[in-house]
Amino acid sequence: MRRALVAAAFLLALLGLWQMAALSGRWSPVLLPPPTMVGHYLLDAWRDGSLVEAIEVTLRRLLIGYAIGVAIGLPLGLLTSTSDFFEDTIGALALGLQTLPSVCWVPLALLWFGQTETAMLFVVVMGTVWSVVLATDAGARTIPPIYARAARTMGSEGFDKWTRVILPASLPFVVSGMKQGWAFAWRSLMAAEIFVTILTGFGLGHLLQYGRELSAMDQVIGVMVVIVVIGLIADKILFSPWEKFLHRRWGTGLK
Amino acid sequence: MTNDAEPRPSPPAELVVEGIDKWFRTNRATTHALDDVSFRVAGGEFVCLVGPSGCGKSTLLDIIAGLTTADAGRVMADGQPVQGPGRHRLVMFQESALFPWHNVFGNVMFGLRRKPELTNAQRRAIAEYYLTLVGLEKYKKAYVHELSGGMKQRVALARSLAPDPRVLLMDEPLSALDAITREQLCYDIQDIWRRRRKTIVLVTHDVREAVCLADRVFLMSPGPGRIREEFRIPLPRDVNSPELAHIAQRIMAALKGYLADTHEAAE
């Protein structure tokens, strides 16, 4: 409770400074709108439905793309960690493509799929999948071999060994890999949405870009705030429970 | 403890190890790890393999468990050749190989869940029984990292006893513990062995541990790993008797002799 109050006070202080800076008159309100103006924009955009729609479009793309990326990346990562063949082929490919910023996939996606939802999903999947592969691979490699040996003597082989021993044992790394994948998916989608307009849906990135075109700084900052808040909420809902679970069981990160 | 809750143990198996040879080949060197190792363990007997590090005793245990294959020779458990790991030969490992994603109870249940002939109620009853046997019934919901080293090894013991193996293989189960905990766990292993009668092969580098636990002690020497001598411990045993201390001294002396030989041969 005390820590929540400290965080709230810090945030309020920041807003206060911002409001004073904006009211001091040194900068034009076009370039530095006060927080009250940003608040007005958010309220209006929420009421007329444009903000809600953009959030829906963006989250749908993000969640579907991310789910596909994890569904592909997780098994691939487990494969590359166990077989020299997959390590030298898919593992090397993942390492190479992970260094490629996913916004670089946008031109190719547009040529292949046109200005469609598929192009957006493709960029998100490409942004997610390689970092998930690499994190899962690294996780499965650091599992103490003694776990697998103990499991084998207790009659756990093959599929059972993979799902009941290797996967849970690599869970700490899988979760951090999924978290990293989430961050990559989020970044790549925002970049893609700012970069191209897709007629089937206007996401938060588009809203941000329109704000720039209209020189509506209150909209630009407002959408940025929304993006930050969504990131925070996603972290709390998607990853915090997992991390707490892991810390409790593994005895890591305890204060 | 009530006797009707006590699951009936399977009969202990007889182990025959015949002419085991093992080489380790890497790009840089070839090591002869085990050279023509043969011995026989009667059903229900407690045997210790003692030797300095590098004498191949852990490799030998792995081969008996079926986790490693030998280059020559074979291991027979009750007349059946060992071809891979199996539930009838469970291993209790050196460092604790407990699973952090399960609590204490879940760890003991792991092997039981892989026995399709049991119902869930039976599995739980068996797990409870063995946790009580090692004195940890109050800790069944605890996680592995919350336990002390001695408690972890007790859970490991319960986990390897619960699926009712006919042979129990122990790879230096006490070496990571402090002296007092080790002594206590030593008594407990003796006590549990008396009640549950398993064929036990225990690997250790601690001579005193060996003479306090085993019926027979095999002394191994490195380069290549061989069994050099066999010592029979007079029973009933009194861990504080001068006779036992004398045997321990003889084993130590023999061990030093073989080590000196190996060093000379190397020079």
Image (tube, coloured by chain):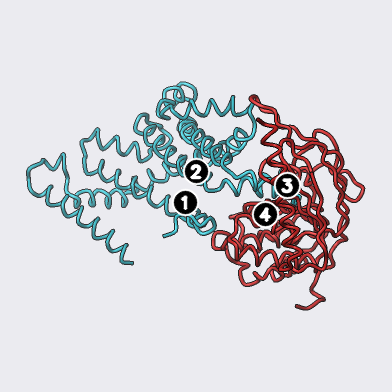
Residue picked out by circle 3:
A152
Q: Quadrant of the C terminus of chain B?
A: top right
Secondary structure of the residue carrying tag 4 is loop
Please say if A236 is above or below B35: below
Residue at 21%, 39% in the rendered image:
A216
Report the residue at 72% width, 54% height from top: B170
Mark 4 = which residue? Answer: B206
**Circles 2, 1 touching at the beta carbon (< 8 Å):** yes
The alpha-carbon separation of the residues under discs 2 and 1 comes to 9 Å
What amino acid is found at the position of numbered circle 3 in the picture?
A: Arg
User: SS at mark 2?
Assistant: helix
Where in the figure is residue B231, as x and y percent of width and height? 81, 54
Labelled pair 1, 3 in contact (Cβ < 8 Å): no
Neighbor class of circle 4 (other Cα within 10 Å; few <14, some 14-19, many 20+) is some
- Give the residue number, with chain letter if any, for mark 2: A178
x, y percent for residue B240: 71, 68
Q: Give how far apart the Cα atoms at labels 2 and 4 are.
A: 46 Å
User: Looking at the rendering, in which quadrant would you find the N terminus of chain B?
Assistant: bottom right
Chain name for mark 3: A
Relative to B158, residue A37 above or below: above
Q: Which residue is pictured at 41% across the width and 36% down the height?
A: A189
How far apart, in angstroms, are the residues tagged by discs 2 and 3? 28 Å
Residue extending farthest right:
B79
Q: Closer to the N terminus: mark 2 or mark 3?
A: 3
Give the mark, 2 or 1, whose residue is nearer the N terminus.
Answer: 2
In the picture, the disc for residue A239 is: 1
Kindly identify the amino acid type of the residue bearing the numbered disc 4. Answer: Asp
